[in-house]
Image: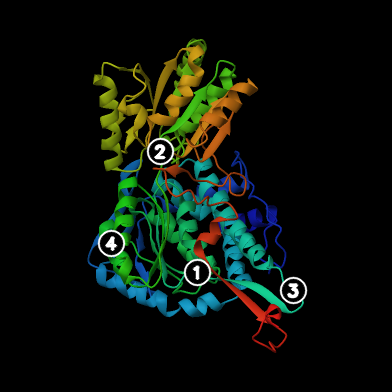
Amino acid sequence: MGQLLLRVLRRRLGLRWQHRSTFEVANEPILEFKLGSLERAALQKTLNDLKGKTEAIPCVVGGQEVWTSDVRCQLSPYNHAHKVAKYCYADKDLINKAINAAVAVRREWDLRPIKDRAQIFFKAADLLSGPRRAEVLAKTMIGQGKTIIQAEIDAAAELIDFFRFNAKYAMELEKEQLISVPVSTNSMVYRGLEGFVAAVSPFNFTAIGGNLAGAPALMGNVVLWKPSDTAMLSSYAVYKILLEAGLPPNVIQFVPADGPVFGDTVTSSEHFAGLNFTGSVPTFKRLWKQVSENLDRYRTFPRLAGECGGKNFHLVHSSADVPTVVNGTLRSAFEYGGQKCSACSRLYAPDSLWPQIKAKLLEEHGKIKVGDPANDFGTFFSAVIDDKSFARIKKWVQHAKTSPNLTILAGGKCDDEVGYFIEPCIVETKDPKDPIMKEEIFGPVLAVYVYPEKQYKEILQLIDTTSPYGLTGAVFAQDKNAVQEARKLLRNAAGNFYINDKSTGAVVAQQPFGGARASGTNDKPGGRHYILRWTSPQAIKETHMPLEDWKYSYMQ
């Protein structure tokens, strides 16, 4: 029955595998999963099949499954009694074996034509779009606590888009060539980096893991992929899909590992050529320092790309549309429990509109359902990812309860008996420089500062200087002058800037994603220039006429 549903769904979506010679690519349609739909039936069946199951996930090194004695478990965030995966950590010796296995196939993979490598990623995207969609969505839901829509826009749509658009951009890049003249032909060859790339992926987006490992591989690199402990189930599914699509076994080594052990080992290798990272600022800084200390070991200067989160803002001007502000802020702050790098965690509202905004925020807040996303499709968001995250966010809620500058307007209850549940919490602050307005929380906590309407310009300057981050931000205003002023004064405050829209929801090829300052290196994955980070171009000139004299004409 399940296979029949999948075949029908595939036909309905018009999916077929084909060798692509053209570059026409469109964003993957987001399915709605309405009651009675084929996609909903397929997903429900897969979720039921996974209930109570624990998948065994090995390290995969040199094309072989390897188990070590350091065995761990991934727990479901909303039901931590359910061990969704059993996996093991690679030790230093196994990581070095993975490096050697990857480097051994580097030349062969790099010499493979771009169009052939691209076909693998097109096929992987087709697998995700059709027969493997329900599996990856279900594993993202039970393993990372995502609702249907949050899993769909991540593990299906965004990952499919990453694979297809990156492949399209790579083929177009090769097609765009240099200027040649009658006496000589000039060309550009896009080589992989001379060594291996370490990909370190986070828990919060299945798509990010696939892209951090996949984009360098597409461009001719070999990769060591360290997935997040709390996204192991979905990451391994993506890895197997890449192999099923034709990726040679040694191009990407799948190596779960302790973070410091992995970082120490890869940055100590002479073959280290790049780091593709999403995670915390302290971890990225640590890796960067290790690389700088080991520069004399390397054959080449490594490429370092990192995305490290943000303290993202919504700024409301007095001319803003209140329903748009409220609905956009609730989605941005609380979808996926505020665990998106782009989630809004600070709101600046003018005193003239605050009574309306506050009343509507609290009214809608009361309608938010927090629960089990696999059994109740009416759930808006679920538990936070693990016990460490729960404890950290709980401390912020406690700070809000005890600080004289802060008032909890709604939510904030914490319960980890069954899962790591935290109610969406709205906090008003009298102090715009309180730590709750400056530091990343990565949870369902929204801090609000009410400013005097006439101090709009001063608030722009405050927003720009309050936090060390610079990832996303939004301004809500109908007044065009207010928008232009915000664009000018907040030019460096956000790498993704939204006007009358929420600070989350970047789409591949529409809003390439990333920010600077403490938010990272702003390489904009999802854009056509991102793949250039993972290639070492070689310019070639071939002259067709003999050189008959070494002397120049002016010398005669």
**Residue 293: mark:** 4
Mark 3 to mark 1 CA distance (whole Å): 43 Å
Up-down relation of residue 379 to residue 509 (above or below): above
Task: Tell me which numbered mark, 2 or 1, is placed earlier along the sequence.
Answer: 1
Amino acid type for the residue under numbered disc 1: Leu
The image quadrant where one finds the C terminus is bottom right
**Image-quadrant location for residue 254:** bottom left
x%, y% of residue 255? 35, 65
Task: Tell me which numbered mark, 3 or 1, is placed earlier along the sequence.
Answer: 3
Q: Residue at x 45, y 35 (%)?
A: 343
Q: Residue at x 54, y 25 (%)?
A: 327
Task: Tell me which numbered mark, 4 or 3, is placed earlier along the sequence.
Answer: 3
Mark 2 to mark 1 CA distance (whole Å): 37 Å
Task: Tell me which numbered mark, 3 or 2, is placed earlier along the sequence.
Answer: 3
Residue that carries the numbered disc 3 in the rendered image: 181
The image quadrant where one finds the N terminus is bottom right
Q: Does residue 208 appear to the left or right of 396 in the view shown?
A: right
**Residue 243: mark:** 1
